[in-house]
Amino acid sequence: MAESTPSDTPLTLEVFTAGLWRENPVFVMMLGLCPTLAVTNSVINSLAMGAASIFVLVCSNALVSVLRKLIPKQIRITAYIIIATFVTMVDYIIQAISLDLYNALGAFIQLIVVNCLILGRAEAYASRNSLGKTVVSALGMGLGFTFALVCLGGVRELLGASTLLGFQVFSSNYEPWVVMLLPPGGFIVLGCWLLLFNWLKQRKTTKMIAAEEAMDTTRQIETS
Amino acid sequence: MTDTDPKQPAQQAPDLPSTWRLVSTLSIVALLSGILVVLVYEYTKPIIAENKRLAIERAIFQIFPDAKSTLAFRIEDGQVVAVDADATTGEIVHAVYDQSGQLLGVTLEAAAVGYQDEVRILYGFDPETQCIIGFKVLKTAETPGLGSKISTDPDFLANFNCLQAQVDAQHGGLCHAIKTVKHGSKQHPWEIDAISGSTITSKAIGRMLNGSGQLLLPVIVDNLQLFRDAYRSGAVDNK
């Protein structure tokens, strides 16, 4: 935007990896939960939704970043019509690639337009940063989003249909947990993944505190 | 109201861009968006149409494995008219022929709302036996493992070995309305035995077949000779 100040921080690997893990859109920021819960009943749906979201996120954020100095602050949100443009484009492209996939994803392709991850990144990052950083960050965020969708889709498809990417995994003796393919299954699996992520985060924090305390104790001994 | 410090300079309102700049910026963004959408639409339009045509063609040859060629027709105000093979609007009927040009049957599209969204199918009708002899799902968003069983459950698909859809004597509808009944309680050849746990989708199939059958099958039966003659007089789309 005309009045926004570009960030002075350099383009580092951290810009890319932040979205993958430390600021993962689903597991940390809890953004875009509607498609996360709705389409993750199979891995292929998760991958397709992830790819569509990456396309829209990268293209729209890149354009917002390029135009940020030209678009007056007062009409910046209106200018985010750019997002709808790329969603419409991805809608046609998926229909051209596979009608089965398009039917499986249903209305959730069009609903990418209201995914708060994409609008949020446009407003909070793309409108304040250079094109290079914006594209790298958007790619990281998009891949992080896809990673989260596949995590959910993999568990739900495995337990709910005993398949993975359509290939049979368990023997015919296994009775599929159909609930995993239904909306409650989405909430249960998301809850389990969040539990795991928070536990990993907590364990990391505890280790860091313990390491700092150990260093402090060493320093005190050395001083005395 | 707060007292202003006379030593501080008066706070100035931020400069607002001119209306012309706001309007021109939004116009440029909208123009750019429009161009991008139109370019992608024009590029993908023939590919999407071809995908749809292939999906229907695949479904026809799965319902009628002995089929060798098809001709497309449209039902307009109770009349059957020949159309191009890639026609998609209106009630499209595909007449299906074997190697020797004998009419094997016709396929029609039907749709109804299922559990999640609209379910659209292509079903085959054999005019000799007056039976619906199979269907293929063209569009569905039903729950995988539940509603999606309509395409895979062998017991459910067995309903369509010959689902009776006999046209009544007045050619105003079907003798018996096609309906879906509770799993295990099928008694008549015009009833569909529902899938246990997928009742809503099973009922949607029954509803759409009955709706389409009551309306279109009498027209099909009235025009059987037209379908037979069309093969001899016109070119066909070979497999």
Image: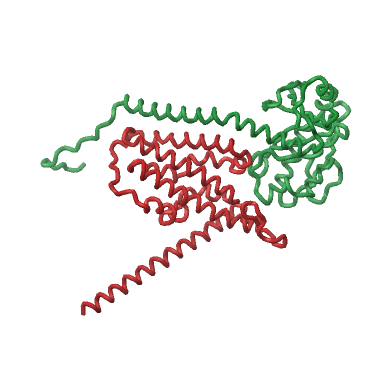
Q: Which residue does the image show at 16% across and 41% down from the upper left? A: B4
> Where's residue A71, x and y in %?
34, 33
Q: Nearer the viewer, residue A11 or A80?
A: A11
Query: Which quarter of the image is occupied by the N terminus of chain A?
Result: top left
Coloring applied to the structure? by chain
| Vertical placement of residue A70 versus B84, above or below | below
Q: Which residue does the image show at 47% across and 61% down from the upper left? A: A197
Query: Which quarter of the image is occupied by the C terminus of chain A?
Result: bottom left
> Where's residue B61, x and y in %?
76, 36
> Where's residue B38, x and y in %?
50, 27
> Where's residue B71, x and y in %?
76, 26
| Vertical placement of residue A13 versus B216, above or below | below
Can residue B231 be seen at all in this image of the molecule?
yes
Q: Nearer the viewer, residue A201 or B41?
A: B41
Q: Colour of chain A?
A: red
- Left or right of A78? Residue B78 is right
Figure disc tally: 0
- Left or right of B185? Residue A114 is left
- Residue reaching furthest to the left: B7
Q: Nearer the viewer, residue A23 or B3?
A: A23
| Vertical placement of residue B146 versus B88, above or below | below
Q: Which residue does the image show at 72% across and 41% down from the upper left? A: B204
Can residue A178 be seen at all in this image of the molecule?
no
Quarter residue B55 falls in: top right
Quarter residue A167 falls in: bottom right
- Left or right of A4? Residue B176 is right
Quarter residue A58 falls in: top left
Q: Colour of chain B?
A: green
Q: Which residue does the image show at 75% across and 34% down from the upper left? A: B211
